[in-house]
Image (cartoon, rainbow, N blue to C red):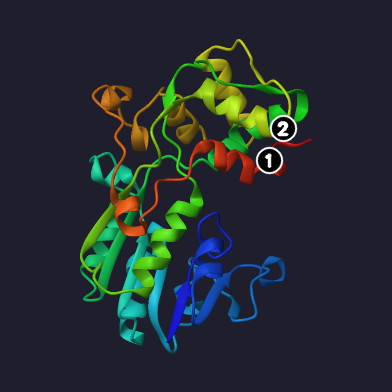
Amino acid sequence: MTTLVTGATGNVGRLVVRGLSGHVRAITRDPAKASFPAHVETVRADLDDPDSLPFDGVEKLYLFVHPPTAAEVVERAVRAGVRRIVTLSSGAVTYGYDKTHHLPVEQAVEASGAQWTHLRPGEFAANKIDLWGPSIRADGTIVHPNPDELGQPIHEADIADVAIRVLEEDGHAGRAYDLSGPPPLTQRAMARDIGVVLGRDLTFRDVTVDEALEYYVSVGWPREIAEYVLGVAGYEGGDADDFTDYEFVVSPAYETLTGRPYRTFARWARDHAADFRG
């Protein structure tokens, strides 16, 4: 039985690849940069080119969302014999914010006739590496206009844990699992957790929202995503007021499925200390 993992070198995908048992086929644009266990077959392929995807003998698919070709990828997968598809989606679908990115992919998967399960995580803790990493490595500062703003980042390993479980065991067909992460923290508390593992005090720069926006764009974030992260605009470029009624909750799916609580942000910081060292 072969499981095909797309997005295999991503934050979640690489952990899914390593955690699955049986024959795993991992696709990547650059196999030379992949380093997987011996039981993993690494294949050069690209979601932008559905014909390149090696579905022969594949029964299960871990699907990284790529809207431009998702419908064709799913159609080819099912035609080739894929029976179970686990989609890495977003909690924004649950809350009705996402209508044009993750949602159409979920819909294509649901219409395919295969068994499906959607994983809907919220804020990825790993975003802090790109957002905060450059300035922490440079001078021990963080660029964020509101240190007391709450966030609820999830460890990518928690998402992978659930993905592996629903790929390998029955009983999850037709379900969408919201994966919130642990209780919310202020940005200041997250900075403190990172500082502890680095053995240094981190400070927030005194910046406006506009200054932070320009900084995030300068380190590589698309402007529309940076605007969303900073609350300048809503999800998918919508109204920033979209989130005025948002309430942080700890979804029970992870603990129900694994019997463990979510990993804390402090644990995530320990696991990624090297990413913040200069």
212 over 27 or under it: above or below: above
* Residue for point 61% across, 10% down: 206
Rendering quarter of residue 213: top right
Query: Residue 110 at x, y = what percent?
Result: 22, 66
Query: Residue 23 at x, y = what percent?
Result: 51, 83
Do the numbered discs 2 and 1 sit on residues whose CB atoms are within 8 Å?
A: yes
Quarter of the picture holding the N terminus: bottom left
- Left/right of residue 212 with respect to residue 160 in the rendered view: right
Q: Nearer the viewer, residue 85 or 223?
A: 85
Q: Residue furthest front?
A: 259
Counting every numbered tag in the picture gives 2
Decide if residue 89 is in sight here: yes
172 over 220 or under it: above or below: below
Query: Residue 115 at x, y = what percent?
Result: 25, 73
Residue where numbered disc 2 is placed: 198
Earlier in the chain: of badge 2 and badge 1, it is 2
* Residue for point 50% across, 54% down: 157
Residue where numbered disc 1 is placed: 273
Q: Mark 2: which secondary structure?
A: helix
Amino acid type, residue under disc 1 in the picture: Ala
88 over 236 or under it: above or below: below
Number of other residues with Cα within 10 Å of mark 2, as a class: few under 14, some 14 to 19, many 20 or more: some
Amino acid type, residue under disc 2 in the picture: Leu
Q: Residue furthest bottom?
A: 57
Rendering quarter of residue 247: top left
- Left/right of residue 212 with respect to residue 33 in the rendered view: left
Q: Mark 1: which secondary structure?
A: helix
Query: Residue 33 at x, y = what percent?
Result: 70, 65
